[in-house]
Amino acid sequence: MKLSLDANGRRWRPTVRVRRSWLTESEVLFELRRRWQRTVLLAGVTGLATGVGVAFFDYVTDDLLLHEVLDLRLALQMAAPGVGLLLATVALRYLARRASPSTSDEYVNYFHDKHRRLPLWPVPGRMVASVLTLGSGGALGFEGPSIYLGASIGSTIQSRFRDWFTREDAKVLMVAGAAAGVAAIFKAPVTGAVFALEVPYRHDVAARAVLPALVGAATSYVTFVAFQGTTPLLAVWGEPPFSTVDLAGAALLGLLCGAGARGFAAAMRWAKEAARRTRVRRRLPAAAAGLVGLAGGSYALYESALTLGPGYDTIRWAADPTHGLGLVALLFVMRAAATTLTLVGGGAGGVFVPLAVQGALLGRFVGGALEQTHTPLFPLVGMAAFLGAGYRTPIAAVVFVAESTGRAGFVIPGLIAAVMAELVMGNDSVTPYQQVRRAGHLERRLRLPVTAALTREVLTVSPRTTLSELVSEHFVAANARSVPVTSDGRYLGMVRVEEVEQVPRDERDVKTVADVLVSLPPAELSWNLRRTVAVMEEAGTRRLAVVDHGRLVGVVTLAEILRLDEILDEVE
């Protein structure tokens, strides 16, 4: 209601603006039905676009590049992965504007941040880097770029039609796109949908996106197979047995796969950290030399390039019962080393298939040790267990084995092994962005990046400033209790009121900030708020400097992190 003058301007008259603030039950149901019809339609569009994009990516990477590389002379094959890593580094630096080589990790990372959508500007550079890495024989999987491409398409479409979605549905098309990417590249629609729903959490699923994920995966699968055909990804022989010995062996294999997946996850974290912290001119030659050595060793031992490419040939090799256990165990180590070196070199790709490869080799080893080599049971069960534990997606891993081989009978032993591996895996994972389960508002706040509470415009002080100047210009004039100390933009520490108060007044004109400097640890620009708060508590401070490669970029305070109005805004 608002008051206004009437036509003659001599008296006030109440006028009312009527706004309908309620809907009948039938209108609510109609609105929900219309919203889901729109969501399903856009999920189908996302799946269609993703299927076409993944088909083109697969054609260029596999048919035009990788097959040609594997037909080259041995010396050129050995050198190809190193050249691919070099070109991928150039693509990431200039086409993606120094973006990281992350692909599927970007989907998990942005899924948990409702305030941001996947940016489009790094997509061309990352996809080119993925083509160069995988097409030259890098030991990573095609699914990582496929997930990233689909998630980016879904995120972009949802941003264009954002008025059709609520806050709770802010990521449904991104999930549909990720499901479409997996469904297309593996020709496995159920795997795509289940994986996209499972992977954001370790002990939960993205339940609100089930229908869009199924629609996106189915549409993408149909689109992809229209170009590539419906032949299963992994053709196997034999029928799945269900004897007590086989099921007990599956449980044992699950325990071993859980332990192996934990080691593999640790190696992947180390490789990504080494790629981030080590200069290109050091890590790239070392990674290339290592890949050359592994390729040469593979030819010497196996007469084939089993350390090159995503590893489908390795899975087929593992299913052959004639190979000795020593060669199987050695190839397990060599494939893990090849994947690690590809990541260290800055390669772009996924680790879904590398996990499955490690599981197939471990399963073949256990099956050989138990003299159970008459069927491909143990390699396939190992794939399900190792993959399910590594990504914390046991259902998707088991369904993947059934869909990619065309043999649903392997599901029961695969489930047994996947459950045992999940128990051994603990709280570990190959992706650092997974969350345990859906969190409350405050916990989601703490998982935001430190930039969400960063204050960039801050006063700093030189270590040569006298304490008298510090008190008058900062503590009094600016009402600050702590000030970052910098020299040529580099962070040195903090100077606080508590330490200055202990200096007698008659000495403050002589003593400088350097005399009372406190070496408080800074927060890194890449941290999230939870880690920042933990460092604050350990250091006993409520204000922390934030640095990027040693240079001060701002400060973050506990009050800013825990502002009540931000939490209430999340609730709304």
Image (cartoon, rainbow, N blue to C red):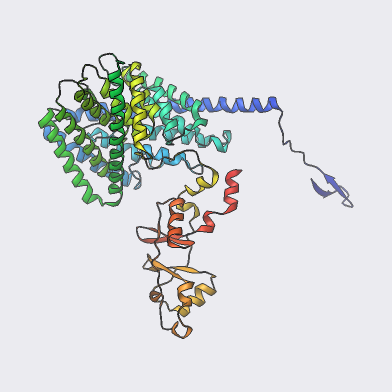
Q: Relative to residue 418, is residue 570 depicted above or below?
A: below
Which quarter shows the N terminus?
Answer: top right
Q: Nearer the viewer, residue 30 or 568?
A: 568
Q: How many marks?
A: 0
Does residue 128 show up?
yes
Please tell me in which quadrant of the rendered image residue 461 appears: bottom left
Looking at this view, name the residue that lies furthest to the top: 239
Question: What residue sits 30% from the left and 42% below the top?
Answer: 266
Looking at this view, name the residue that lies furthest to the left: 300
Does residue 52 show up?
no
Which quarter shows the C terminus?
Answer: top right
Q: Relative to residue 354, is residue 481 depicted above or below?
A: below
Residue 547 lies, in percent from the top left, at 39, 59
Position of 301 with respect to 15 (left or right) is left
Question: What residue sits 18% from the left and 39% below the top?
Answer: 291
Residue 424 lies, in percent from the top left, at 34, 35
Question: What residue sits 39% from the left and 31% below the top?
Answer: 393
Q: Relative to residue 160, is residue 360 depicted above or below?
A: above
Please tell me in which quadrant of the rendered image residue 361 appears: top left
Position of 428 with respect to 166 (left or right) is left
Residue 516 lies, in percent from the top left, at 41, 74
Residue 448 lies, in percent from the top left, at 47, 48
Q: Nearer the viewer, residue 485 or 428?
A: 428
